[in-house]
Every structure is written in C-alpha cells, then in structure tokens.
Image (cartoon, rainbow, N blue to C red):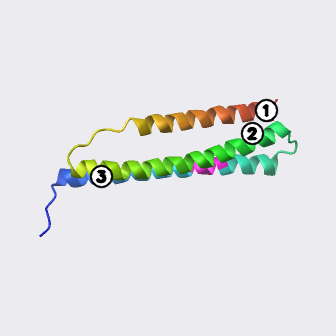
Amino acid sequence: MTKTKSAAFVQQHLANERTYLAWTRTAIAIIGIGFLISNLHFSFLSRHSTRADLLADIVGFAAILSGLLVLAFSTRSYFIKARAIDNEMFKPEKASILLLTGIIVTLILLFGVYISFVFS
C-alpha cells in the first residue's frame, strides 16, 4: 500500500526539481563561457602575449571547473532538499547561494583582468 501525497507536498518536490534544472542551466552556461573565452582568444586574436595566453587558459579552466562544481553542489542540494521535504523539515540553504555568488564574482574579476591584458 502506498502513501498518498498532498498536492502541496508534490508541488514542493516539483519546485525542487525546477530549481535543480535552473542550477544545471547555470552550470552549463558557466562551462560554455569558459570554452568561449578560450576559443575566441586562441582563434581570433592575432597578437598573443604570454600573460594574455595564460589568463585565457586560467579563465577558461576556472569557468569549466566552476561549472562542474556548481553542478556537483546543485545535485547534492537537490537530494538534501528532497529528503528535507519528505521529512517536513525544510530549511533554506544559504551556503549554495553564497558559493554561486562567489564563483560568479571571481569569474567576472578574472575576465576583467584578462580583458585588461588583451586590450592594453
């Protein structure tokens, strides 16, 4: 015999899934930015300085690594929230928001340094 879930309970799980999908799209976008920066740098810039090449590699690698970290943390968060919803003890997770904010700010700063080297 299966336990019947209320509509509100099901909606919470569906909202958790939508949130996970949003995090996944964010991770894919961050990874895509890493590939884009590396590809544009090495394909279209005729002049390469050693520093600009190194920064393009660092920014690209950092973006790819950051996207994978966001994906890993969002997957972990999804299962923690699903368990919390099942136990009716949900608490909002502040650490993941701070983590994503830190990752994005770091990537923006790295990209800014890269741009300053390429166009100076």
Mark 3 surroundings: few (<14), some (14-19) or many (≥20) residues within 10 A: some
Tags 1 and 2 touching, CB below 8 Å:
yes
Q: In which image quadrant can residue 103 be found?
A: top right
Is residue 68 left or right of 88 when viewed as pictured?
right
Q: Amino acid type of disc 2?
A: Leu
Measure the C-alpha gap from mark 3 to mark 1. Answer: 45 Å
First to last magenta residue range: 29-34
Task: Judge the density around disc 1: few (<14), some (14-19), many (≥20) Cα neighbours within 10 Å.
Answer: some
Name the residue: 21% across, 49% down.
87
Q: Which residue is mark 2?
A: 55
Q: Residue at position x 13%, y 61% from top?
A: 4
The residue at 62%/34% (across/down) is: 108
Q: Residue 86's x, y, as percent? A: 22, 52
Q: Earlier in the sequence, mark 2 or mark 3?
A: 2
Circle 2 packing at 10 Å, graded few (<14), some (14-19), many (20+), is many
Q: Amino acid at mark 1?
A: Phe
Check disc 1 and report the residue beneath it.
117
Comparing 5 with 36, the one in front is 5
Residue 15: give x, y in percent of width and height: 31, 50
